Amino acid sequence: MHKAEREYQVGTVTDEEQGKQRIFKGILNKLTPQNFEKLLEQVKSVNIDNAVTLIGVVSQMFDKALMEPTFCEMYGDLCFHLSGALPDFNWNGEKINLKKLLLNKCQKEFDRGEKEGSRVAEVEQTEEEREEKRLKIRRRMLCNFGLIGELYKKRILTEKIMHACIQQLLGYDQEDPHEENIEALCKLMSTIGVMIDHHKAKAHMDAYFERMKMLSCKQELSFRARFMLIDAIDQRKNKWQERMKVEEPIPDRVG
C-alpha cells in the first residue's frame, strides 16, 4: 500500500463536536443491512461540515468495520454514499477527504499489525498468551483487508492500491510472507478477484498466482495456509465463481 503520509488526529473538541460524534455513534450502533436505507438518511443529517467532524466520523466507521467483519460490505456502502456527498476540507493547510482518511487508516492498521506480529515472540509470556495475541492480530488484519476489498469494489480505493496490497502481502520485499499475510491475501483475492482479474492486468495476476502456486507447495507452511492458497488458485480457474456455484450436482445412481 501507499505509505500513510501522516496521522490525522484532533485535539480538544467542542461540546457541539462531541454531540455530533455521539449522534453518529448512536446511528452506527443501530445500523444493519436491513435498516441501512432508513438510517443512511439519519447519517446524512449529521452535519459533517468541517475536517474535525470528518476525521471523527471516519475513525468511528473504520473501528466499527473492524469489530464487525460480517458487515464489511455494509460499511463499504456507507463509505461510498458519504464519499459522494462530502466535499474536501482543509486541515492544517492540507486538503483532506473521506477517501484519503480511509486509505491512511487502512495503511496504519496494516503497519501496526505487522509490528505487533513481529513483537509477539519477543515479549515474555506463555505460549497460550502468544497464541491469543496472534489470533487477535490475525482477526484485525483479515477485517482490515476485507474492508479494503469492499472499498475497492466501490471505487473508493484504486486498482493501483490493490496491486500494492497484493505485492506487499505476497512478500515481494522478503523471502516468504507470514501465514497471516497469506490468509489476508486469499481473503482479498476472493473479494476483488472478479474485478481486478481483467485483460490489462493479466501479466500482474499471472505473476501473483505463479508465486502463490510456488508457495502452496512449500512444506514449511502449515496445511491450512497451503489449502487457502490452493483454494484461491481454484477460484481463479473457475472465473471467481463461488465453489458451490461451480460444483456439478451429484446424479442419482441408476439401478
Image (cartoon, helix red, strand yellow):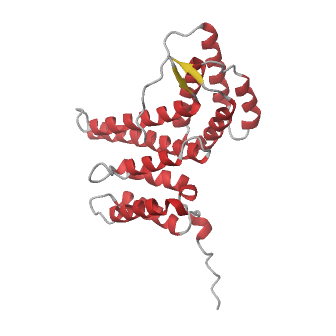
Image check: 241 left or right of 34? left
Q: Which residue lies furthest to the bottom in this view?
A: 255
**x and y percent of residue 221 in the render?**
30, 58
Q: Which residue is more in the foreground, 210 or 87? A: 87
Question: Which quadrant of the structure image shows residue 77?
Answer: top right
Pick the quarter of the image with the C terminus. bottom right
Residue 205, above or below 87 = below
**x and y percent of residue 50 in the render?**
62, 18
Q: Which residue is drawn at 61% across and 75% down?
A: 248
Q: Residue at x 47, y 32 (%)?
A: 104
**x and y percent of residue 207 in the render?**
40, 62
Residue 36, above or below 20 = below
Image check: 42 left or right of 26? right
Q: Which residue is drawn at 55% across and 23% down?
A: 55
Tag count: 0
Q: Which residue is more in the foreground, 7 or 34? A: 7
Residue 155, above or below 195 = above
Q: Which residue is more in the foreground, 177 or 117? A: 177
Question: Which quadrant of the structure image shows residue 128?
Answer: top left
Q: Which residue is drawn at 58% across and 40% down?
A: 156
**x and y percent of residue 224 in the render?**
38, 58
Pick the quarter of the image with the N terminus. top left
Image check: 239 left or right of 171? right
